Amino acid sequence: MSSAWAGGTDAIMERMDKMTALYIEEARKSIYTGESAVNCEECGEPIPEERRRAIACKYCLPCHKALESASRSHKV
Ligand SMILES: [Zn+2]
């Protein structure tokens, strides 16, 4: 139908990768306010290096998700 798909899945994946990288870069610029916590402020578990480098975060992923869903459900 469209020649835009001519590149196939690889081209789409490549574009997704670039967008993801761009998004992470943007997120890093806007969110980064200093150092990430080494340990989660919620549960005290060490935060993976990968996550700390991606964004300045204070919580591990499970806690972040829990807090996020909690704040969402508390929205009145
Ligand atoms: Zn945690």
Image (cartoon, rainbow, N blue to C red):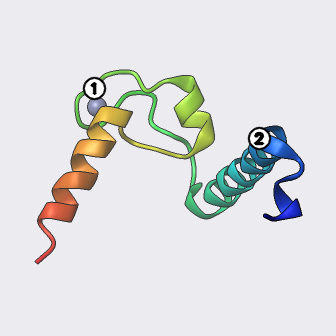
For the point 45% across and 36% down, which residue is it? 37
| Up/down of 3 relative to 11, above or below | below
Q: Which mark is residue 44?
A: 1
Q: Which mark is residue 15?
A: none
- Give the amino acid at mark 1: Gly
Q: For residue 50, which quarter of the picture?
A: top right
Q: Is residue 61 left or right of residue 56?
A: left
Residue that carries the numbered disc 2 in the rendered image: 9
Q: Secondary structure at mark 2?
A: helix
How packed mark 2 is, by other alpha carbons closer than 10 Å (few <14, some 14-19, many 20 or more), is few
Give how far apart the Cα atoms at labels 1 and 2 are.
Answer: 41 Å
Q: Quadrant of ligand 1?
A: top left
For the point 16% across and 72% down, which residue is it? 75
| Up/down of 33 relative to 10, above or below | below
How packed mark 1 is, by other alpha carbons closer than 10 Å (few <14, some 14-19, many 20 or more), is few
- Give the amino acid at mark 2: Thr
Instruction: Tell me the quarter of the image containing the C terminus.
Output: bottom left
In the image, 8 versus 65, the foreground residue is 8
Locate residue 33, reporting x and y percent.
57, 57
In the image, 27 versus 44, the foreground residue is 27
Locate residue 25, reporting x and y percent.
71, 53
Locate residue 36, reporting x and y percent.
51, 40
Q: For residue 19, which quarter of the picture?
A: bottom right
